[in-house]
Image: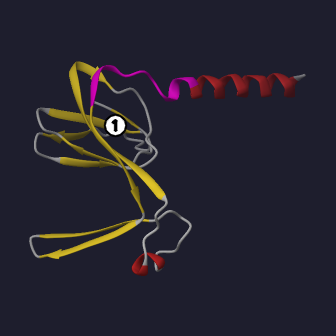
Amino acid sequence: MKRTLGLLCALVFAGYMMMTWASTPVGVTPTLVGRGTFTAFRVKSDNSAFKFKASLASGKENSDDLKSKASLEPVADFVVRTNDYAPGASTGWHTHPGPVFITVTQGEITFYEVDDPSCTPKVVREGQGYVDSGHGHIGP
């Protein structure tokens, strides 16, 4: 009986945590700019003003395969959108399936990462960029 009650309490707690994990955004207005599906690629720039290197693999080939050929299989969707935040807005706690590249074009945004035990605010100001790993955060 004690074991059953303990298991029931654990399940109720886990269910509550799952319901509160992704909270509802308030005061956030998203606008889709564009969306594109990409196949595997490798790109590199040695320009002295802008050095850049990136690759995207489907998981079916190893990174050496991308040197000789690119997969025609769709690998990822890239979405470009703007988000307008009203004063006092909140995105709610949430995650993303991959990284999100954020550019603040006006004002500033404050994020809190789920894995930061000190809950240190990360402030991103107008003209600055930020890479969100997708592991979980709340903003602005």
Q: Secondary structure at mark 1?
A: strand
User: Taking 78 as reference, is 53 above or below it?
Assistant: below
Report the span colored magenta: 19-31
72 horizontally vs 86: left or right: right
Colour scheme in use:
secondary structure
Q: Amino acid at mark 1?
A: Tyr
Q: Nearer the viewer, residue 99 or 115?
A: 99
In this picture, residue 133 sits left or right of residue 18: left
**Rendering coords of residue 50 (x, y %):** 14, 68
* In-image side of 46 versus 17 (left or right): left
Q: Position of residue 35 (x, y in %)?
A: 33, 43
- The part of the image, by quadrant, that contains residue 139 is top left
Residue 109 falls in which quadrant of the image? top left
Residue identified by numbered label 1? 112
Residue occupying the point 42% across, 21% down: 24
Residue occupying image coordinates x 79% and y 28%:
7
Q: Position of residue 5 (x, y in %)?
A: 82, 22
Tell me: residue 71, above or below residue 21: below
